Amino acid sequence: MTTSAISRADGTSQTAGTATEARSRSGRALPGRPSSGRGARIEGLDGLRALAIVGVLVYHLNASWLPGGFLGVDVFFVVSGFLITTLLLRERERTGRIALSQFWVRRARRLLPALVLCVVTSVLIARAVSSDLLVDVGRQMLGALTFSTNWIEITAGTSYFDQTAPQLFMNFWSLAVEEQFYLFWPLATLALLAVPSRVRVGVAVTAGAGSAAAMAVLFTPGTDATRVYYGTDTHLIGLMAGAALAFAWASPQLAPWVAPSRWGRLGAYAVPLALVVLLGEMALLDEQSTLTFRGGIVLASLATAVLVMGVVERRPGGPTGLQRALQHPVAGWVGARSYSIYLWHWPVILLVALDNPSAPGTMSHLLTRLWCVLVTLALADLTFRFVEAPFRTLGFRGVASRLRGGLSGLTVRGKRGLAGAVTAVAVVTAVIVLTAPDQSETARMLAENEAAADAAALATPSAGASSPVPSATSATSVPVGLSPTPGPSASRPATATGTKASFTMPAGNEIDAYGDSIMVGSLQALRYYFPGIRIDAKSNRRWSDGLAEVTARGDGNRRAVILAFGTNAGVDEDRVKQVLDTLGPDRMVVLVNIMGPFARVDTDNATLELVARGRPNVVVADWADAIRAHPDQVQSDRIHPTIKGAHLFSKTVRQALADLSERRTGTAVVLKELPIP
């Protein structure tokens, strides 16, 4: 256990080091190093933490606002690697040793009290809001309290990027990476102190490069990246970059290279350029981009390392513009509370989102997100003042002593009441954990619908079979789903190649549907609106899977086809075009766009619109716009539709088919409103 990268380090961990470290043997201050001795504080690092936590917070509030905001975690890693390594070196310089037990105790008192408070409080409130937030909460709590969240979730097969149940403590994976690393890093540092400074730096750089290489090699484009993102072995880049920088900064021989002003002409632009690179990546990268895992995280870590150099360098002319900005009181306030902000922000976002559903792009969404920020900051400030600070300054024994002093003034009744309250909280928390569901309502519904789809696939009638047709009539009073009497401009379709196309409103038994879990969740509603529809849908499918299924059926595809992919791994433009080419221009095709808490939603939907624009037989069903007006019709994962949402999904598809029919035939299609059964 050690100071989290997203926490405000102990006062000693932000000191510049001893006078011996700050001066060369000749007694002259080293270039770019403070010379004020052991009390010199590294001003500006709280500002870097503020930048990092703002990036993470904005990303989790709405990924489309800052698609690469998750890189704020890597900023934290670099700062943490630098500070803790500096702390270890300073302790060795001052005392001649590194007291490992004291080091780990300081980390425990720094992290555990606030963590326990957040975990217990979040679980109690979540129970009152939605049981979906408590799925596998026992496992989550075990990971949180033992700093093993990342490996526990990897072993459980949990996805950071694709979930049917929102994890209350999903963000704790990064704390786990840090604590595991710093559990053995003091031991590694002790060993490295026996070799020259250049070797220490080289070892840290090599370890970071190896981790980056492992991430790049193990990442497979188009598949879930949780393993490489969560893995301690594959996500050491930032921590090792910070450690290498600390080793160099502590060395009289290497310290000059840590001062950007000594890099010649490049040095004048290095720090501003690093800031531009970091902010640019936060704005442009996304959580599923190949570039993110094959260079993006490395570049962000290196840019942060340069920013740290810009922070620690002391120039004769006084603070630079960046240093002044990072030392601003507001940045310092946020940075000092960044650990508590990080703890609270994700549970708060989930709880508020379920209690006050809202859709991205609406004023309601903006207001609820603002409320999330205010609640998070308030909780973080209270936690910082009344939990973090006391335990950091007094320690476990000091806080216990103070509590005993406070309790001594209570009456017997008061003491009993307090003991009863604490016991009640413990018992209730235990009961919640023991009775927590192991599957969300969304996951259960998807599993049941998939089973139903598989069973129906075995008994699906042929494409030409008749079926009762519901509910709507065209302007010519022809029931929706039936074509007008075949004539010069309208003939009954057939699935065989070479037959004349028909764009009249299709019946359910003239429709094939292919999709992912969104379609799985809408299975019953689709059958209700399109009796006889043939549905081929599975969770976690991608556009590449859709291409394979459509191609496999070949000419057996019916005259109208619904395609709903993109929730997993986004919209692959080339695959979409290949699917449409396979289906040909004589079939009616509906592309259903996507909606969810993804940074790529707008881009993916724009791609679908662009592809459909040049094909007269293709129309886009605007599911994103339809559900945006009804955020309460989405499950707790903010992705899959509820029962009402499934009907909205089906009606959106039905309207798209009607629009396409009218566009191609010139005959209006009047759709009757069907009651939700």
Image (cartoon, rainbow, N blue to C red):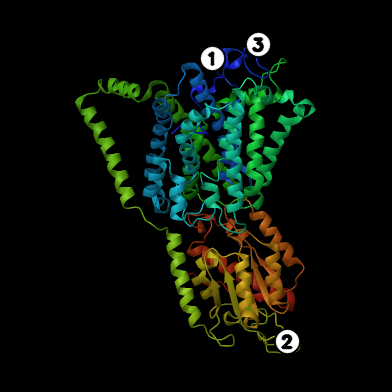
- Image height of 621 relative to 349, above or below: below
Residue 199 versus residue 362 in the image, above or below? above
Where does residue 293 sit, x and y in percent of width and height?
62, 49
Residue 413 location, quadrant: top left
Name the residue rendered at 32%, 53% in the picture: 435
Disc 1 element: helix
Residue plotted at (49% across, 41% down): 177
Q: Earlier in the sequence, mark 2 or mark 1?
A: 1
Instruction: Determine which of the numbered discs, if any, sits on residue 375 in the image.
Output: none
Residue that label 2 marks: 498
Query: Farthest top residue?
Result: 27
- Circle 2 packing at 10 Å, graded few (<14), some (14-19), many (20+), is few
Residue 173 falls left or right of residue 206: left
**Decide: marks 2, 1 in contact (CB < 8 A)?**
no
**Disc sitting over residue 39 in the figure:** 1
Q: Secondary structure at mark 3?
A: loop
**Disc 1 residue type?**
Gly
C-alpha distance separating marks 2 and 3: 89 Å
